[in-house]
Amino acid sequence: MSTSILAVESLGKTVADTTGSLTILHDVTFSVTAGETLAIVGASGSGKSTLLGLLAGLDLPSTGSVRLHGQDLFRLDEDQRAALRGRHVGFVFQSFQLVGHLTALENVMLPLELRGETDHVRERAVDMLERVGLGQRLSHYPRTLSGGEQQRVALARAFVARPDILFADEPTGSLDTATGEAVIALMFELNRDAGSTLVLVTHDRSVAARCGRILTIEAGRVASDEFMDVGV
């Protein structure tokens, strides 16, 4: 029987603005099965990145709930949410979010160290960097790496702990087309090999089409939820 790794119920987000309030998300409900690849698409300002932040427990909703591995994220405090993410979640961001004063190797080792792991941490990080083609860049700092190389470090960091679910927010948004295509191919390859669930926010329909399912957000609402014939 399929297992739901992520369950979203009546999720809403309203923020204050100059007119009084602005509703970004309205009554969003869906679930994600373990091992699925889900693309969340929509125009700029549709609410898709806000939704991703709520799914990961990085932001708080105005209404509704998100259950990750059966845990209601918003019944947990901030430290408990962070601990849950540390055990189960990987992230890839448009802006890479590497730690500037750490080398590529140290950036990839970081999530393992934060989890308190001590066994073969360096070896696992080296293996992942070699896997993404950066075995000769271990001691390089982010500022000395190209955008594509930085995003590959970010992929290695995201997958080194073998997350149950990976959240990716416009992972090619800062890259040129050719580099972006290579990074996306690598991300899907790593995700397939890890057996992770992938939730990907993108404005690029060709990237979304590589997923097994596409959730379209329009004006903060779920406009369509399509299961694709061909996955990754």
Image: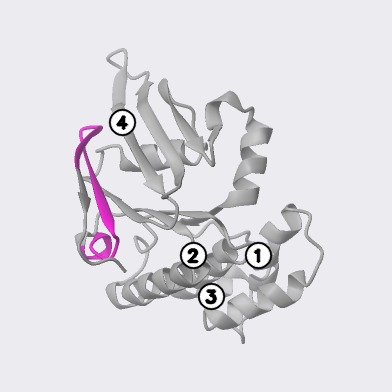
- Inspect the image, locate mark 3, and give the three-letter code of the amino acid beneath it: Leu
The numbered mark, 3 or 2, whose residue comes first in the sequence reads 3
| Neighbourhood count class around disc 4 (C-alpha, 10 Å): few under 14, some 14–19, many 20 upward | many
Rendered view: 228 above or below 122: above
User: Could you say which is closer to the camera, residue 89 or residue 176?
Assistant: 89
Where does label 3 land, which residue? 145
| Neighbourhood count class around disc 2 (C-alpha, 10 Å): few under 14, some 14–19, many 20 upward | some
- Inspect the image, locate mark 1, and give the three-letter code of the amino acid beneath it: Asn
The numbered mark, 1 or 3, whose residue comes first in the sequence reads 1
Separation of disc 3 and disc 2 at Cα?
29 Å
**Numbered disc in front, either 3 or 4:** 4
Where does label 1 land, which residue? 107
Q: What is the secondary structure assignment of the residue under circle 2? A: loop
**Numbered disc in front, either 3 or 2:** 2
Residue name at image x 67 percent, y 42 percent? 83
- Inspect the image, locate mark 2, and give the three-letter code of the amino acid beneath it: Gly
Range of the magenta residues?
A: 206-224
